[in-house]
Image (tube, grey):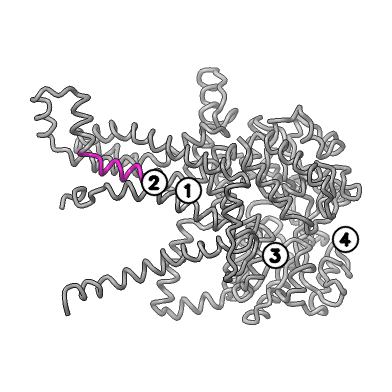
């Protein structure tokens, strides 16, 4: 991996970038000054822009430029901190701020649609897109539909399993798949692993490691087991960071041998650079109905904002085109499978090395070994246990 | 119009700006801190549950670490800044500008970029320091990365200029004839330092120390990028409540406590400071 590439990745994944920083504050101040000074052109540009509340792939500059060139409409965006954070922002009234939201599978069906925070999509226009995806997404696909099955709530695109990553020079992938989450319970690996602080995912992973189904209600015994596992895993971690590049570097430097949470999203860019010993693992088995992996599927929806409803629909249709889907699959420098890779026209755009980087040969098996992502019951209590353990560390 | 009324009139725009920009956000945060945990509405049903949690739910370590790091970093920066400021003052015009620029320029580079650079430097194995030692001297060395020591080094590295430049201002306030007079009267070097130089340079040193202390209490990037979150600092604990926990009232209560704690340190120090003297009015 070249130094410039490394630095680029580090900058791109800088955890502080998504939060408020000096540039954002100055930008905000400038916008306020401009607004108060009555600069109508600037204000109109802001109004015309399509607003995305999204994960990073949809903020790829190539995607934004292509959309602007084809439609003349600019895009502004904000990257999520976590799914629940953005859901609560929409609940708090930001539906008039955003036009497009890109969240993991359960939120649209369970929260956004019942609370009138998103529009349903015209089925005649959008269902044909599902016919061009993998069989898994064939209609009626539950996560894309309202609970009564009558309303189409979004367009599925990025998906994968997100569990843990090992250095295959140290831990054989086959052994890692068989051992699953018990690798982190093994005292031999104490102080030899890192934690990627995507904290809602960490909660699910610790459930898996404690032998608890993350997406089912917990008993008091489950909470006790979760707390014991959380404290042990957190205290035994060599490093905790929000930056997966740091974890990949720590693995290449021999500082750690594995980390959770991770998957294609965190491993693919390093693998594409030749570090193929960074290997995403989905356990062969686990406590979630016998499965140990977690499969997330992003659903792209139109926020219930009447100002730009049609533009949001156009964007949702456009992201499924081969050119846009390809950029999204390479979004922000990370290779990531998209549902449109079921089409030869899209799949053929990826080289053998790129497919190896996303471990495409075993992708179906990984999906089969994973339970689909869902809302975690008792999340608040579990998160409080987790964050208390983090505070006690050191 | 009397002079007093004219003064109030001229003050009004700035007062309005401060009220809207600084006071009202604090009032809103204070209001949120009295709401039910994990609620998102501002109402008039107040509770002190969040403040109770702040003292009972294990927030002691973040307060301890942030205060400790702030105190030790401030002290270290003061100890390093004093001789540096003296040297820069003495050699002003003779190369000191270059050294000053070398220290000042990094301030204009994003803090996280500098810390990532430091992380690459300290990284074991293929890191710049460890890799160079192995390549040049065949020496295998360990690394302090992801330890409390790395957090401390990062804090000193980032905040040193914030002490140095006010200290330089303080040193410039010391008239050379006072030092000469003290020496003529038989004062030792220690006595000159303690009884002449430090009291005269105190305003600059206090400003530098305050700046560094307050910035360090709010620092998070050093612990996140260099420390591998080996400890949780206050800002991180607050951030967790606002983000993944979606518990704005608890985050607001912690924020109010941080503000109160900072005020306890800052206001007594500021009240002893004679800014007029510092700017030589």
Tag 4 and tag 2 share a subunit: no
Between A334 and A43, the one nearer to me in the picture: A43
Q: Residue at x 61, y 76 (%)?
A: A96
Q: Which residue is mark 1?
A: B218
A5 vs B72: above or below = below
Separation of marks 1 and 2 at Cα, in angstroms: 14 Å
Q: Which label sits on residue A136?
A: 4
The quarter of the picture where residue B156 lies is: top left
Q: Which label sits on residue A102?
A: 3
Q: Residue at x 39, y 49 (%)?
A: B108
Q: Do tag 1 and tag 2 residues touch (Cβ < 8 Å)?
A: no
| Residue A356 coordinates in the image, percent (x, y) | 77, 45
Between A313 and B68, the one nearer to me in the picture: B68
Q: Which residue is mark 2?
A: B265
Q: Given the image, what chain letter belongs to the residue carrying mark 1?
A: B
| Residue A311 coordinates in the image, percent (x, y) | 65, 78
The quarter of the picture where residue A111 lies is: bottom right
């Amino acid at each position: 991996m070249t130094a410039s590439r490394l630095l680029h990745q580090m900058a791109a994944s800088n955890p502080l970038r998504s939060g408020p920083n000096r540039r954002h504050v100055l930008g905000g101040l400038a916008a306020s000054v401009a607004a108060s000074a009555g600069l109508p052109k600037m204000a109109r540009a802001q109004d015309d822009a399509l607003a995305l509340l999204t994960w990073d792939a949809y903020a790829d500059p190539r995607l934004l430029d292509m959309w602007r060139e084809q439609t003349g409409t600019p895009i502004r965006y904000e990257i999520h901190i976590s799914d629940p954070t953005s859901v609560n922002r929409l609940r708090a009234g930001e539906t008039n701020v955003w036009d497009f939201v890109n969240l993991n599978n359960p939120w649209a069906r369970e929260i956004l649609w019942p609370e009138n925070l998103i529009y349903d999509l015209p089925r005649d226009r959008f269902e044909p897109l599902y016919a061009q995806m993998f069989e898994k997404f064939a209609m009626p696909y539950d996560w894309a539909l309202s609970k009564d099955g009558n309303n189409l709530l979004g367009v599925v695109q990025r998906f994968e399993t997100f569990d843990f990553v090992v250095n295959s020079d140290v831990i054989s992938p086959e052994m890692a798949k068989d051992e699953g989450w018990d690798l982190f319970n093994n005292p031999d690996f104490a102080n030899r692993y890192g934690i990627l602080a995507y904290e809602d995912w960490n909660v699910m992973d610790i459930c898996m490691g404690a032998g608890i189904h993350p997406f089912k209600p917990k008993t008091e015994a489950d909470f006790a087991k979760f707390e014991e596992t959380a404290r042990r895993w957190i205290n035994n971690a060599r490093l905790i960071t929000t930056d997966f590049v740091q974890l990949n570097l720590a693995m290449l430097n021999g500082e750690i041998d594995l980390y959770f949470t991770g998957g294609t999203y965190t491993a693919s860019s390093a693998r594409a650079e030749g570090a193929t010993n960074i290997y995403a693992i989905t356990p062969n088995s686990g406590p979630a109905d016998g499965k140990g992996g977690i499969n997330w599927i992003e659903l792209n929806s139109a926020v219930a904002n009447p100002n730009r409803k049609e533009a949001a629909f156009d964007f949702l249709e456009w992201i499924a085109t081969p050119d846009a889907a390809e950029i999204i699959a390479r979004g922000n420098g990370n290779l990531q499978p998209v549902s449109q890779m079921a089409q030869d026209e899209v799949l053929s755009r990826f080289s053998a090395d790129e497919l190896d980087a996303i471990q495409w040969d075993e992708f179906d098996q990984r999906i089969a070994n994973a339970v689909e992502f869902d809302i975690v019951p008792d999340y608040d209590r579990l998160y409080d246990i987790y964050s208390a353990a983090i505070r006690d560390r050191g | 119009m009397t002079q007093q009324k004219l003064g109030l009139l001229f003050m009004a725009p700035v007062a309005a700006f401060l009220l809207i920009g600084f006071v009202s956000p604090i009032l809103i945060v204070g209001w949120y801190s009295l709401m039910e945990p994990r609620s998102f509405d501002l109402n008039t049903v107040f509770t002190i549950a969040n403040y109770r949690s702040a003292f009972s739910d294990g927030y002691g370590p973040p307060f301890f670490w942030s205060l400790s790091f702030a105190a030790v970093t401030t002290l270290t920066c003061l100890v390093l800044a004093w001789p540096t400021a003296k040297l820069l003052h003495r050699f002003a015009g003779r190369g000191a500008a270059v050294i000053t620029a070398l220290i000042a320029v990094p301030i204009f580079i994003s803090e996280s970029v500098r810390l990532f650079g430091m992380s690459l430097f300290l990284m074991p194995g293929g890191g710049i320091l460890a890799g160079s030692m192995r390549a040049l001297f065949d020496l295998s060395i360990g690394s302090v990365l992801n330890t409390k020591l790395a957090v401390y080094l990062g804090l000193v590295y980032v905040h040193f200029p914030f002490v140095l430049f006010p200290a330089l201002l303080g040193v410039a306030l010391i008239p050379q004839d006072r030092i000469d007079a003290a020496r003529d009267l038989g004062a030792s070097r220690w006595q000159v330092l303690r009884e002449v130089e430090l009291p005269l340079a105190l305003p600059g040193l206090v400003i530098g120390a305050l700046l560094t202390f307050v910035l360090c209490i709010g620092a998070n990037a050093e612990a996140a990028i260099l420390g591998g979150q080996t400890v949780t600092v206050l800002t991180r604990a607050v951030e967790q409540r606002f983000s993944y926990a979606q518990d704005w009232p608890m985050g607001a209560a912690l924020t109010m406590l941080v503000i109160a704690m900072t005020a306890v340190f800052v206001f007594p120090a500021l009240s002893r400071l004679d800014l007029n003297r510092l700017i030589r009015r």
